[in-house]
Image: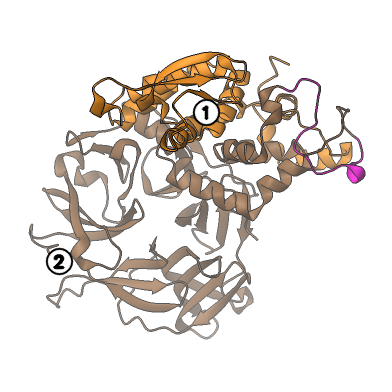
Amino acid sequence: MAAETGTPTTLTLKSNDDELFSVAESAAILSVTIRNMVEDGCAGGVIPLDNVDGKTLASVITYMNGISAIPADEEKKKSYRDKFLSDKDFETLADMVLAANYLNMSCLMDAVSAKIAQVMEKKSVGWVRRKFGIENDYTPEEEAAVKEEHKWTFEGVETDDDN
Amino acid sequence: MEAKPGSNSSISDHHQPRSFRRRIETPAAAETLPEEIIEQILLNLPVRSLLKFTSVSKSWRSLISSNRFIEAHLEFSRKDPNFTHYRTISTFSPPRNGGVKHCSLPSLFNGNGLATDAVDVDFPFDFSEKSVRVMGSCNGLVCIVTHEAHLLILLNPSTRKFKKLPDVCDRLMNTIICAFKYGFGFVESTRDYKVLLVCCVFRRDSSRCETMVKVYSLTTNSWRRIEFVVEDRYGFDVSGIFVSGKLHWCKIVKPESNSTFGIDTFDLGSEVWGNVTQPPSCVESGFYVSQSLGVVDGCLCVFYDHPRIGVDVWVMKEYGVSESWAKIVTVPDIHLPLISYPSNHKPSLCVGPKGRILFVFGSIVLIYNPRNNKFTCPDMKNFGGFLRSHVYYESLVPLV
């Protein structure tokens, strides 16, 4: 595709809050969603990405550029992904996992899912309910019984530092 | 997915839809995650955290307890290129109190020679007879046998659930059981776990001695006696290596016969005995004093111990295809002073991150890096000498 012409093809992506981004096609097609649009010939103008906001899209494009600059070396790619995600907070990670899912980028999806799990691992049940917006549908008796069943798993749970 | 407006907990669930979340006015991204994404995130969690999060809500509990999720989590853990949820479980020689320890595989591989912690396995039951050995592991379950009473236990160290197997023989008969062979594995077609025991039962009252083969099925929770057709001498207390649905043991070589050894197999599904050919040129590098079996990366392997030379490791890359035997490495003798591991210490190994191979010989832990052909020895705290290490990965597999 791009390589044959000598000059790399650039795509323009539009976030759902109308920000425009230029990105090399070779990096953008890490997203299967975008690749399909390019292959279907929809990439002539601006590619609208209705489910991704500008802040998240900027971050995803940073990732696309970073990871596609690394040659086929899975260890280097892994350390890039680890570093890329290391300073992201829970809310940003949640935005990114939704974006990666929508854009169909399995490598980013896997890495962000693993990172979210790492953040959750030692958190309390209350923290998870708050962060994921989950209703506690247990009666107090039921909840006590479920907790009692796996009592040992509550040792060493982090105290909630944010609400 | 409809949900009611934000309300506090402790409401009776009878009128509530089974939902993962409630709707609030300006939901953050995390509160809008579809179920399949939540499930993908949960697959990354260790078993301990998953059990804790069964308290989050009824729908999380039913997801985490579902067979579909348990199997997906098992596959995810098994295939994880970082081996995050892999552990070794080791037993000691001679057996001693609290004689089972586990250690996470990434901590062994990433220790760069720094001390790694080995922790005692926390038995979830009152264990008066703590001298135990691990006889096999499969899908995150381990089969444990107590040293004297031949009490067999299946344990999931990650969920801390366990099951004591029924007695092999009627204990009232005043019998002594002497075990020749053990094995533990999984039957894919029936989704059943089975334990094999080849033993000699000695009746004190009649002075009669009888050899028998019994198979335990977790589904029926009972032992069944099966036909005995192995003509080989049986060895003693040998645990079979579970690969491709079959248990494997080295055949004992008769000194007078000039033959090389063979590998006996027992198919846990069909309950048929058989054999596998050994590496074709296993004796090319001369005399070896002992051989034993192992499993590496899901493949059957054989160790040949050549005194003062080293240990050759052969792997059958494609199960049942004798042409696929290949020697992957010789661990030089210098790394394995023979004096430190009596011959009954079975080597154990596994492939870890970046293709590196972990070897456990007696009390020695070695990591071989095929890229630079170098060996390193991570230092393990609280470890001491042990008889045998098994590698398992965490799973939610229930013992029912």
- Find residue B152 and report its image quarter: bottom right
- Find residue A11 and report its image quarter: top left
> What kind of element bears circle 2?
loop
Q: CA distance from mark 1 to mark 2?
A: 47 Å
Q: How is the image coloured?
A: by chain
- Chain with colour orange in the figure: A
- Chain with colour brown in the figure: B
Label 2 sits on residue: B280
Q: Are marks 1 and 2 on the same chain?
A: no
Residue B102 percent coordinates (x, y): 47, 41
Residue B22 percent coordinates (x, y): 80, 31
> What kind of element bears circle 1?
helix
Highlighted range, magenta? B11-27
Q: State the residue at coordinates (78%, 40%).
A: B19
Between B107 and B121, the one lying in front of the other is B107
Label 1 sits on residue: A112
